[in-house]
Image (cartoon, rainbow, N blue to C red):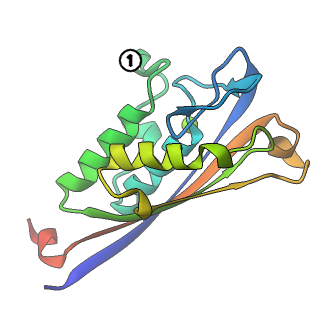
Amino acid sequence: MAQEFRTGIGYDLHRLEPDRKLIIGGVELPFEKGLAGHSDADILMHAITDALLGAASLGDIGELFPPTDPQWKDADSEVFLQQARELVVGYGYRIVNVDAVVVLERPKLLPHRQAIRKNLARILAIDADRIGLKAKTSEGVGPCGRGEAAEAHAVATLVRDAAAKLM
Ligand code: MG
């Protein structure tokens, strides 16, 4: 049966501020600053959520979970990713893979990479080997390089039987 592959892209940036937790991919990294935002500001989960929604042309995270809605204040971003997964699965898609880059000057992400991949795999209900995760610094320049912000970029590939489009 013919299969339809679709790719989506997601991007997010949040400011780094004192007195906030630094949560990336659902894992808390010990650091003097954390990501500021209405939810827990998990840049990686937000970027992957948008990549999934984008691949299926289902809008974006801001439409589905408006920051003006008090129910999402300090929300665990796992909820956003979980709901995006349920949406695309509901449209007949299977997640082939996710790949992501986190841009963060400090602290080092690498020691947490496996824990983050494992956590994302659990939420997305796919094997961890379908999740790529890289960390980059910004060479000391720009908001990420100065430690004022961190950002994440993600792509996701979905597949479904072409016949599913008819349903
Ligand atoms: Mg965000």
Can you tell me which quadrant of the image ligand 1 is in? top right
Q: Quarter holding the C terminus?
A: bottom left
Rendered position, 39 above or below 7:
above
Residue closest to the eye, 112 or 54 = 112
How packed mark 1 is, by other alpha carbons closer than 10 Å (few <14, some 14-19, many 20 or more), is: few
Q: What residue is rendered at 38% in x and 17% in y?
A: 71
x%, y% of residue 24? 58, 38
Q: What residue is rendered at 32% in x and 40% in y?
A: 82
Rendered position, 55 above or below 69:
below
Furthest residue to the left? 167
Instruction: Kindly state the secondary structure of the residue where label 1 is placed.
Output: helix
The quarter holding residue 16 reads: top right
Q: What residue is rendered at 49% in x and 42% in y?
A: 45
x%, y% of residue 46? 50, 42
Number of disc labels: 1
The quarter holding residue 112 reads: top right
Q: Quarter holding the N terminus?
A: bottom left
x%, y% of residue 110? 67, 49
Rendered position, 131 above or below 103:
below
Q: Is residue 16 visible?
A: yes
Residue corresponding to mark 1: 71
Q: Is residue 60 visible?
A: no
x%, y% of residue 142? 86, 47
| Relative side of 33 to 10, left or right | right
| Relative side of 96 to 117, left or right | left
Residue closest to the eye, 111 or 22 = 111
Rendered position, 146 above or below 94:
above
Residue type at tag 1: Gln
| Relative side of 93 to 17, left or right | left
Q: What residue is rendered at 80% in x and 44% in y?
A: 105
The quarter holding residue 88 reads: bottom left
